[in-house]
Image (spheres, helix red, strand yellow):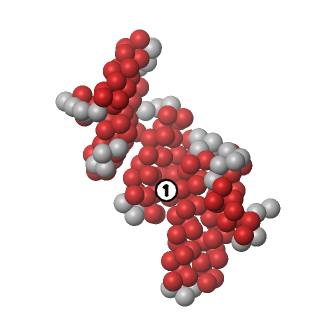
Amino acid sequence: MPRSRINGNFIDKTSSIIANILLRIIPTTSGEKKAFTYYRDGVMSAQSEGNYAEALQNYYEATRSEIDPYDRSYILYNIGLIHTSNGEHTKALEYYFRALERNPFLPQAFNNMAVICHYRGEQAILQGDSEIAEAWFDQAAEYWKQAIALTPGNYIEAHNWLKITRRFE
């Protein structure tokens, strides 16, 4: 039984019912319906409950069925989120890059990439390697600039960091 059918949350159930109705009335291919079902089960159930292994399995299945680049970008982005949560930063960056290849207008992917680079910069400082740290901070700055350019007014802390560190042009 799909995970979305066993979720006890009223809002999730309502959303699932609406999604199922929309899947029936909107003309879509069976592959698109299958991809959406796996995506929905990954987002609305498994990932929100912290069951990352199950969410990843659903997202990987969704990538096998989803052909639309825009929709696929969100699946890849969510896979990146899970890898970030699991501390697998290299894998996370890979999936954020893949998402941005399909949809270059995902400021949240740029932001998450910047956060990972900033974290790596901080780790380099702790290891006493200021040159590597600066390189990571410079890369973080570039990603944050892209996120801010896409959504001016968002990422205020990043914007302030860019100003304080004189990386904002």
Disc 1 residue type? Glu
Residue 159: image location, x then y, percent: 69, 59
Quadrant showing the N terminus:
top left
Whether residue 37 is visible to the viewer of this picture, yes or no, is no
Q: Which residue is mark 1?
A: 94
37 to 55, vertically: above or below: above
Give x and y (percent) for residue 35: 38, 31
At a point 52% along the width and 52% down the height, the residue shown is: 96
The location of residue 112, given as percent across then percent down, is 54, 56
Q: Is residue 75 visible?
A: yes
Q: Quadrant of the rendered structure where residue 168 is?
A: bottom right
Q: Nearer the viewer, residue 128 or 164?
A: 164
Q: Quadrant of the rendered structure where residue 151 is?
A: top right
As drawn, which residue projects farthest toward the front? 10
Would you place residue 157 above or below residue 121 in this image?
above
Q: Helix, strand, or loop for circle 1? A: helix
| Nearer to us in this view, 35 or 136 | 136
Say few, some or many: other residues with alpha carbon within 10 Å of mark 1 (under 14 / 14 to 19 / 20 or more): some
Q: Residue at image x 34%, y 40%?
A: 42
Q: Is residue 76 left or right of residue 14?
A: right
In-image side of 147 versus 91 (left or right): right
Count of labels in the image: 1
